[in-house]
Image (cartoon, helix red, strand yellow):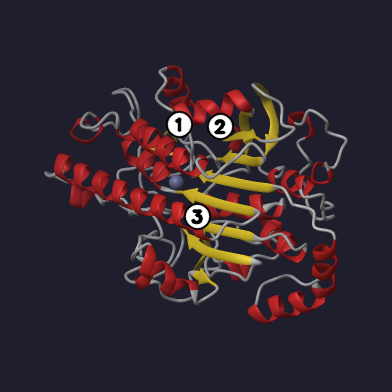
């Protein structure tokens, strides 16, 4: 098996699959289109009231036209750990990306020991486009394009601490595949931020809380606007059969601006009573991003909106100093988190719509897990699930689960 890790492997794969492409030309059969939208740390406790109030109309439309529910995640969930499980449908100890830091260095794609879905799809001739997906740095060759996301390294980045390099500031690997696409993006989209803004430290906040909070939120919106422009650009000019886009600012906001009450741990009125809508506002802003993406989606496109985990106010005695969140900014006054030992405390979320997917279906309990996304997408393309994958096809969301969707 060739695992598409190095560009020379991709070339080899192209040569090996040439006869396949030849056959496809003689009997053209359109492949399904799938768009996955990842939202880091999407918290259903915050989203549901917004949906009831009609403040997330685009997500409400997806729910009405499809299936939705909680997404069971792994233990001590964090972004690289869960995303790599979403990519491979294997356990963190199997795929190797067990956390933000692995063996003393920041998690990166060279650590991935199991084959990710973009590689399997590329090998089957499916065109693949990915933008801003966490834990995809350095980018890997695909049958299309890949632009890295959260955990991209660059100027002023320290190991294991998030930072927000612009495309031109990336260091230590490629953020864009194919390499020539980087100049095209700089020219047509601009020098966008690849990751969300790092959180302010306690020192930066002290005495200046409101000004620092407002400036930070403004920067977050700038980053979201740039990423939306990027999504719009790639969906317009580089349409692919399989597309995966992601957002990471929602989770970052929740860590220190979750709307907690005075009884919660770490409550500081100078921070937590200032912009109490900051966190819910992230989802209202995300809904607009979703609206932009949905403009590129027709009735024959499958859409999956997924979150790696939720986020909740501090609640367990699992660390001596829970406020010192090693994964984000060591001195940020963190009041909410997600890497609880019991992942069921902070489930992710799952929304799906598309041809043959049931309408208005609510998944109860933990019917869907982060292991199930890759097998379900492979099923849509009629690709057999590789042995190492631990998840299952979410047949319960399909009206006719027995049929191979791709052959309809
Ligand atoms: Zn987080």
Left or right? Give the position of 283 relative to 245: left
The image shows residue 197, relative to residue 317, as above or below, that is below
User: How far is mark 2 from mark 1, CA to CA?
Assistant: 10 Å
Residue 388 in view here: yes
Instruction: From the image, state whether disc 1 or disc 3 is nearer to you.
Output: 3
| Above or below for 52 versus 21 | above
Residue 208 percent across, percent down from the top left: 13, 44
Where residue 198 sits: x, y (%)? Answer: 33, 54
Using the image as rendered, state which of residue 381 and residue 301 is in the foreground.
Answer: 301
Give left or right: position of 25 versus 86: right
Q: Which residue is mark 2?
A: 345
Query: Within 10 Å of the Cα at label 1, are there few (<14), some (14-19), or many (20+) other Cα atoms?
Result: some
Farthest residue, direction left: 207
Circle 2 Cα neighbour tier, 10 Å, few/some/many (<14 / 14–19 / ≥20): some
Q: Residue furthest right?
A: 402
Label 2 to label 3: alpha-carbon separation: 39 Å
* Residue extending furthest toward the front: 26
Q: Which quarter of the image is occupied by the C terminus?
A: top right
Q: Residue at x 41, y 49 (%)?
A: 228
Task: From the viewer's perspective, tell me whether residue 382 is left or right of residue 217.
Answer: right
**Circles 2, 1 touching at the beta carbon (< 8 Å):** yes
| Residue designated by label 3 | 236
Mark 3: few/some/many CA within 10 Å (<14, 14-19, 20+) = few
* Residue annotated with mark 1: 315
| Contact between labelled residues 3 and 1, with CB atoms less than 8 Å apart | no
């Amino acid at each position: 098996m060739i695992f598409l890790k190095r560009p020379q492997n991709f070339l080899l794969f192209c040569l090996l699959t040439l006869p396949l492409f030849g056959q496809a030309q003689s009997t053209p059969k359109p492949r399904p289109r799938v768009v996955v939208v990842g939202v880091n740390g999407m918290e259903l406790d915050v989203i549901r009231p917004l949906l009831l109030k009609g403040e997330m109309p685009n997500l409400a439309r997806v729910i009405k036209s499809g299936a939705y529910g909680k997404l069971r995640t792994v233990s001590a969930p964090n972004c690289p750990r869960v995303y790599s499980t979403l990519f491979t449908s294997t356990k963190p100890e199997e795929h190797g990306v067990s956390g933000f830091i692995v063996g003393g260095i920041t998690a990166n794609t060279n650590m991935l020991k199991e084959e990710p879905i973009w590689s399997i799809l590329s090998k089957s001739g499916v065109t693949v486009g990915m933008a801003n997906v966490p834990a995809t740095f350095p980018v890997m060759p695909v049958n299309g394009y890949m632009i890295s996301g959260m955990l991209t390294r660059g100027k002023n980045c320290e190991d294991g601490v998030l930072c927000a390099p612009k495309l031109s500031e990336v260091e230590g690997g490629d953020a864009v595949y194919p390499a020539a696409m980087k100049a095209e993006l700089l020219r047509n989209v601009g020098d966008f931020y690849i990751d969300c803004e790092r959180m302010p430290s306690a020192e930066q906040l002290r005495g200046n809380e409101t000004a620092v909070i407002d400036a930070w939120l403004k920067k977050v919106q700038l980053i979201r606007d740039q990423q939306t422009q990027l999504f719009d650009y790639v969906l317009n000019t580089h349409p692919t059969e399989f597309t995966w886009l992601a957002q990471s600012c929602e989770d970052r906001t929740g860590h220190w601006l979750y709307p907690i009450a005075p009884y919660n741990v770490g409550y500081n009125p100078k921070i937590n009573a200032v912009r109490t809508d900051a966190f819910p506002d992230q989802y209202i802003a995300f809904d607009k991003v979703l609206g932009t993406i949905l403009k590129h989606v027709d009735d024959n496109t499958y859409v999956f909106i997924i979150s790696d985990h939720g986020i909740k106010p501090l609640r367990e005695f699992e660390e001596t100093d829970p406020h010192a969140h090693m994964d984000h900014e060591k001195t940020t006054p963190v009041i909410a988190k997600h890497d609880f030992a019991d992942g069921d405390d902070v489930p992710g979320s799952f929304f799906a719509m598309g041809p043959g997917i049931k309408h208005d279906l609510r998944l109860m309990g933990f019917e869907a897990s982060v292991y199930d996304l890759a097998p379900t997408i492979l099923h849509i393309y009629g690709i057999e699930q590789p042995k190492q994958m631990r998840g299952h096809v979410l047949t319960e969301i399909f009206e006719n689960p027995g049929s191979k969707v791709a052959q309809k």
